[in-house]
Image (cartoon, grey):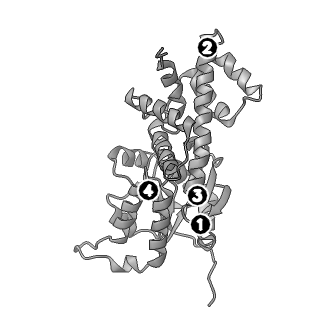
Amino acid sequence: MTIDLTPTEPQCIGIVGLGLVGRALAGRLRSAGYECVGFDLQHDAMDSFVALGFRTEASLPHLAALSNIFLLTVFETAGAMQVIDEILHSQNSDGSENTALRQTSLTFIDCSTGDPALLEKLATKLHGEGHCLIEAPLSGSSSQIAAGQATMLLGGDLLDFLKISPVLEVLSTQQIHVGGAGMAARAKLATNLVLGLNRAALAEGMVFAQSMGIEPDAFLKLVLATPARSDAAVVKGALMVSQQFEPQSRIRQHLKDVQLMLDIAQSKDQELPLSNVHAQLLRHAVQAGDGELDNAAIVRQIRREKSRH
């Protein structure tokens, strides 16, 4: 038996989830000549996508009729599973099930930060039905994704990657294959843990420095000129100094990731003491109304924290 490894060049790519990441990836695909059609449960997100010059469809069944490659940038794995199930069980206009769609090989590229165990099960189920799931979470903010500077962590079957390699190369030129299904989610969670703590440490240092009379802009210059320098300081430091928190990534989203880290660690009987504190800070930030702000706004919550002694 000969396996066909000729890359697939889709005429159209369906994008489900039209938030910051979905829009950034759609822009990259359009620049490379791909047609993108989107869907989101939120009407505002659909309107924003249309305002950028893209086309949308009113339902997942309509989207499913246009493509065999779907890019998923939804909030969590449960949402991705619901989207996939609805696409696979799309109905014809007369209400009958679209069995032809189920007989077509579909590829789902999941760019969300997901639950490794659920993704493993989902990949196995889809493979058994002749479809494939590619994990492709991106490490980087939406602006870095749009600029092609984010690193894509790939989990799944190498043969599946090869079949849609042109699409993946457009989404990110920096790719790391970390293993089978579930492994990209594990890698993303572990690296997000470090990234999130870097941001929180920078914010705490900035607040501490200011309490001693060192202004935030002067402190950031110190950090960037010393071994305390980090990518978090480079990317988020200026936002903390200027107090400009228009989202490139969101506190609410990172809290979801940190809670998933803690849940997995608990199942492994592993304590994550710093992440426990970080999760509490993020929860307080969401409760204070900062959940939709950029992750750099964690500095606001640290300023709100008062001594309990």
Q: Which mark is residue 148?
A: none
Q: Mark 4 or 2 closer to N-term?
A: 4
Discs 4, 1 touching: Cβ within 8 Å: no
Q: Secondary structure at mark 2?
A: helix
Whether residue 254 is situated above or below residue 238 in the rendered picture: below
According to the picture, the residue beneath numbered tag 1 turns out to be 180
Image side of residue 307 versus residue 50, left or right: right
Q: Residue at x 46, y 39 (%)?
A: 255
Discs 3, 1 touching: Cβ within 8 Å: no
* Alpha carbons under labels 4 and 2: distance apart: 40 Å
Q: Residue at x 54, y 25 (%)?
A: 299
Q: Which mark is residue 210?
A: 2
Whether residue 105 is situated above or below residue 303 in the rendered picture: below
Q: Residue at x 72, y 30 (%)?
A: 229
- At label 3, the amino acid type is Ala
Q: Mark 4 or 3 closer to N-term?
A: 4
Image side of residue 189 versus residue 103, left or right: right
- At label 1, the amino acid type is Gly
* Alpha carbons under labels 3 and 1: distance apart: 8 Å
In the orientation shown, which residue stands out farthest toward the front?
Answer: 269
* Alpha carbons under labels 4 and 1: distance apart: 17 Å
